[in-house]
Image: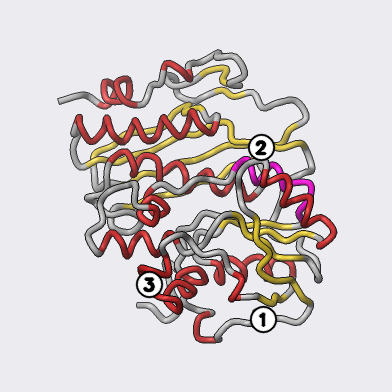
Amino acid sequence: MLSEFELIARYFADPAQSTGAVGSGVVLGPGDDCAVLAPSPGSQLAVSVDTSLVEVHFPAAAPAVAIGHRALAVALSDLAAMGARARWCVMAISLPEADDAWLAGFAEGFHALCRVCGVTLVGGDVTRGPLSITVTVHGEFPAGQALTRGGGKAGDVLVVTGALGGGRGGLEAWYAGARELDDPLLAAYLLPQPRLAAGEALRQLAHSAIDISDGLLVDLEHLCSAAGLGAELDVAGLPLSAGLVARLGEAGAHEAALCGGDDYELLVSLPAARLETARQRLAALDVPLTAIGRLRRAPGIAGVDAGLLRNGWRHFPEGAT
């Protein structure tokens, strides 16, 4: 049985991301009581934390490599929404047992995404208990340039990156017995891709942004509330994930895109005059950008069946006991 420190050394100390690596900004990494980090000159820090629970955010039987990837990806998505460059992360994980094969897969998925996104794991904690993974991410942007939820203006075009509904579609595919990660819907659910490069590309073009984790409508409500505005949506123009209509039908696919959550795309508002520039920048990253509506002064969200407006994900729904 590995000790806690042996487990950390074997699975979570990545030699490729060691203290002092060029450009890492890591003055002191894992092994001491705290990490010591050096942000880039003239930058401000963005910090966010996300917890992933077994059978709440992912199935217990999901591949360990996907669980590792997903736990980091959903946390990094918040940095993407701020237009931040991802730099560092810390992870606290509780494990029911120290299963070598599972840990190897988990670490593979986690470290692979770290390398893709330029993130260094600089510390954390390992305990015994029900499977739970908490990841805190740190990013940076030039001082004063944070992309926030509250900057939207009436008349802004609402745009989304990528496609919607894949998170819900992938969960339905899992329930139906799909297990291969080359299934595009299952991959969308278990292997979401944080839109970090897109967030940076849009930072100086957009007025506001949020990542779509709880469902388009719920997250649009957050964006509108922060700006004191309403919105009008073109539901027919929503970009749907490949294979979604075939699995859920036309109506089910649109409901998944509006309410399903777990898409981790970006919902952004920007002036109409900047839309083409934004599309060109994201095309260079091979990321589609679709206009789906506008912000408006009148409150509420128009263009959507009122019955759908409360169907997004909420951990503590009103009236629950």
The residue sitting at the left extreme is 1
Q: Position of residue 72 (x, y in %)?
A: 45, 41
The location of residue 10, given as percent across then percent down, is 29, 21
What kind of residue is marked 3? Answer: Leu
Q: Is residue 3 above or below residue 307?
A: above
User: Residue flagged by tag 2: what amino acid is it?
Assistant: Leu
Relative to 77, is 142 on the left or the right? right
Comparing 313 with 282, the one in front is: 282
Q: CA distance from mark 2 to mark 3?
A: 41 Å
Q: Residue at x 25, y 51 (%)?
A: 179
Quadrant for the N terminus, please.
Answer: top left
Up-down: is 132 above or below 303? above
Residue to which mark 2 is pinned: 45
The picture places residue 209, in percent across and down from the top left corner, at: 67, 56
Alpha carbon separation for disc pair 1 and 3: 28 Å
Q: Which residue is mark 1?
A: 300
Q: Earlier in the sequence, mark 2 or mark 3?
A: 2
> Which amino acid lies under the numbered mark 1 shown in the image of this protein?
Gly
Q: Compare marks 2 and 1 and give the one earlier in the sequence.
A: 2
Q: Given this view, does label 2 or label 1 mark the residue nearer the observer?
A: 1
Secondary structure, mark 2, is strand
Residue 23's label in the rendered image is none
Q: Residues within 10 Å of mark 2 (few under 14, many from 20)?
A: some
